[in-house]
Amino acid sequence: MTAGTTPQSPAHAPIQPRRRRRWLRWTIIGVAGSAVLLSALVAAAIKLQPTPAPLTLPATASTPAGPLDGTYRAVAGSTAGFRIQQRIVGLTSDVVGRTKDVTGTVTIADGQATTARLRVGLLALTSGDAKPAPQFGISLDTQRYPDAAISLTQSVTLDPAFSSGTTVTANASGALTLHGIARPVTVAVSLRRDGTNIDVAGSFPVAFTDYSIARPKGYGAFGSLSDHGVAEFLLILQRP
């Protein structure tokens, strides 16, 4: 090589940019594939996760016994809670919260439900798989407002067939106190005598904004929770 000769680049040098582009392409494909796989796994988890059915009257009941009129108390077996729709990677399902901390009384007189005052302990809320549900405790601010309450604001006339053990339905006008705020509600209820007890199942919609409740946190880019839900309950009422 003479002093005036310019060094030549290696023949294979142009290959490097092509390798970088190939590496970048496979990286993008890998990331996209991982995202698809993650979405598929999330979707499968949603489909496979059991969601508790809405609260309804027990499947069977005993023949009515004893007088109907009287004041009944909510006893073991009573349950209350809510369900909120969630949407994740295009799929929808329900998030369900439940508690058995339900107390209160219902009075029946002359074929009417004349009074009802019930308390629901929100600190005992669990998710559908019976695990604690802290995200709802945060939204409901259960440390400041540990209870919800519902009361009857108008008497409900019961179908005469109720006395003999027939399941009857009615729309009850009441008031729900939640997060320290009371609002009127209309509750669709089903009632049936069960031996000396009365079983009552009901539900009604709840808009979180009506009670100044923060919308439950969703799942970032993968999905979200609705800004409203359905409150539901099953009461096992027993006369002392």
Image (cartoon, rainbow, N blue to C red):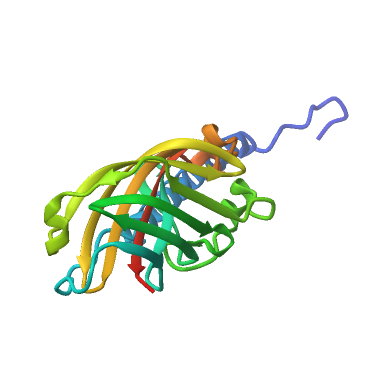
Residue 188, percent from left and from top: 29, 44
**Can the viewer see residue 25?**
no
Left or right, 185 with respect to 199, comes to: right
Residue 138, percent from left and from top: 63, 50
Give the residue displayed 33% in from the left and 44% down from the top. 155
Left or right, 195 with respect to 234, comes to: left
**Can the viewer see residue 117?**
yes
Q: Quadrant of the C terminus?
A: bottom left
Given residues 91 and 17, the one toward you in this image is: 91
Given residues 179 and 19, the one toward you in this image is: 179
Q: Quadrant of the N terminus?
A: top right
Residue 160, percent from left and from top: 13, 52
Instruction: Determine which quarter of the picture holds residue 8.
Output: top right
Left or right, 71 with respect to 130, comes to: left
Residue 74, percent from left and from top: 41, 66
Give the residue displayed 42% in from the left and 48% down from the top. 39
Q: Residue furthest right?
A: 3
Left or right, 63 with respect to 112, comes to: left
Give the residue displayed 50% in from the left and 67% down from the top. 131
